[in-house]
Image (cartoon, rainbow, N blue to C red):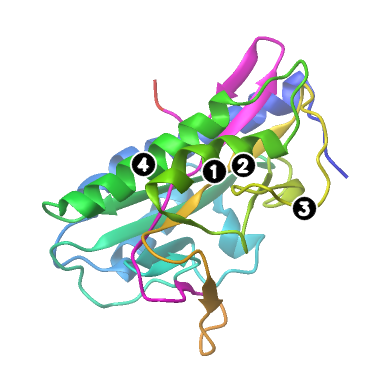
């Protein structure tokens, strides 16, 4: 069931999201050659504690660490390791916070050093597809699957694989809520109308090769591209309010 938030709840979620956006601003200089996922994850734990927040993926979502840190052909749910980052690595960070009972979710793909033109386009196009998906939300007459339709219309002509085995979701009062949000089109399942009070985490995962993925059999979490191709992941938490669609995890 979709949880419709009132104005007080949206204000609490907004505060959580602004703190999360601040964390991404502060961690960006840490994404550099020689640093490690474990070091950044430890930083995230310290950041959350400093502001009396909790890392929601670990505390409430069952994930083993505070952050998901996925490298190169890892799409999502990567477990941080002590392997040093190298020049050219794509480092995708997915992080969520719970603050005073309100949940936020955001993801960004970074590249270390100077990217190839192909990688630069992958990251740029994935981030742009996220914004296109958000802009597609018509609170008067639109439906959830409009998001995937808009993202797909932008990415598919460029030859990308849009991951369809994992999706966006509602958020705000829990780590994951209804509705599920496909980033591809056509898609199956419920297609509810947009409604004021919805809070959504939209997060296209885009591969240079096939859309097909698999879960690592050893750690049971990390999702990899089936063909080993590179992947990017961008996510915002957005609220449907009485003044329109608000991107809560964007620093202004």
Q: Is residue 246 one of those drawn in magenta? A: yes
For marks 4 and 1, give the CA distance. Answer: 12 Å
Q: Which residues are magenta?
A: 222-250
In the picture of the structure, the residue carrying the numbered disc 1 is 152
Badge count: 4
Image quarter of the C terminus: top left
Q: Position of residue 174 (x, y in %)?
A: 72, 48
Q: Secondary structure at mark 4?
A: helix
For marks 2 and 3, give the CA distance. Answer: 11 Å
Q: Secondary structure at mark 2?
A: helix
Name the N-terminal-most of marks 2 and 3: 2
Name the N-terminal-most of marks 4 and 2: 4
Q: Nearer the viewer, mark 4 or mark 1?
A: 1
Image quarter of the N terminus: top right
Relative to 149, say whether 218 is above or below. Answer: below
Instruction: Name the residue nearer the viewer: 55 or 217.
Output: 217
Q: Who's the residue at 47% across and 31% down the image?
A: 131
Residue 125 numbered mark, or none: 4
């Amino acid at each position: 069931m979709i949880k419709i938030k009132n104005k007080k709840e949206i204000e609490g979620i907004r505060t959580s999201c602004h703190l999360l956006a601040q964390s991404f601003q502060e961690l960006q200089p840490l994404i550099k050659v020689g640093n490690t996922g474990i070091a950044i994850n430890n930083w995230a734990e310290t950041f959350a504690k400093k502001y009396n927040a909790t890392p929601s993926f670990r505390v409430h979502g069952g994930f083993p660490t505070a952050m998901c840190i996925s490298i190169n052909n890892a799409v999502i749910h990567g477990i941080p390791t002590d392997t040093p980052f190298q020049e050219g690595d794509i480092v995708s960070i997915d992080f969520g916070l719970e603050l005073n009972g309100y949940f936020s979710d955001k993801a960004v793909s970074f590249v270390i050093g100077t990217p190839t033109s192909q990688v630069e386009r992958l990251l740029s196009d994935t981030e742009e597809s996220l914004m296109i998906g958000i802009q597609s939300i018509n609170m008067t007459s639109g439906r959830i699957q409009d998001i995937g339709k808009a993202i797909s219309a932008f990415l598919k002509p460029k030859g990308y694989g849009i991951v369809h085995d994992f999706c966006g979701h509602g958020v705000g009062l829990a780590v994951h809520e209804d509705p599920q949000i496909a980033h591809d089109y056509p898609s199956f399942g419920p297609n509810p109308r947009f409604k004021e009070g919805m809070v959504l985490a939209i997060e296209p995962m885009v591969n240079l090769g096939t859309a097909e993925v698999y879960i690592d059999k050893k750690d049971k979490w990390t999702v990899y591209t089936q063909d080993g191709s590179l992947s990017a992941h961008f996510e915002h938490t957005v609220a449907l309010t009485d003044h329109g669609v608000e991107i809560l995890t964007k620093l202004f």
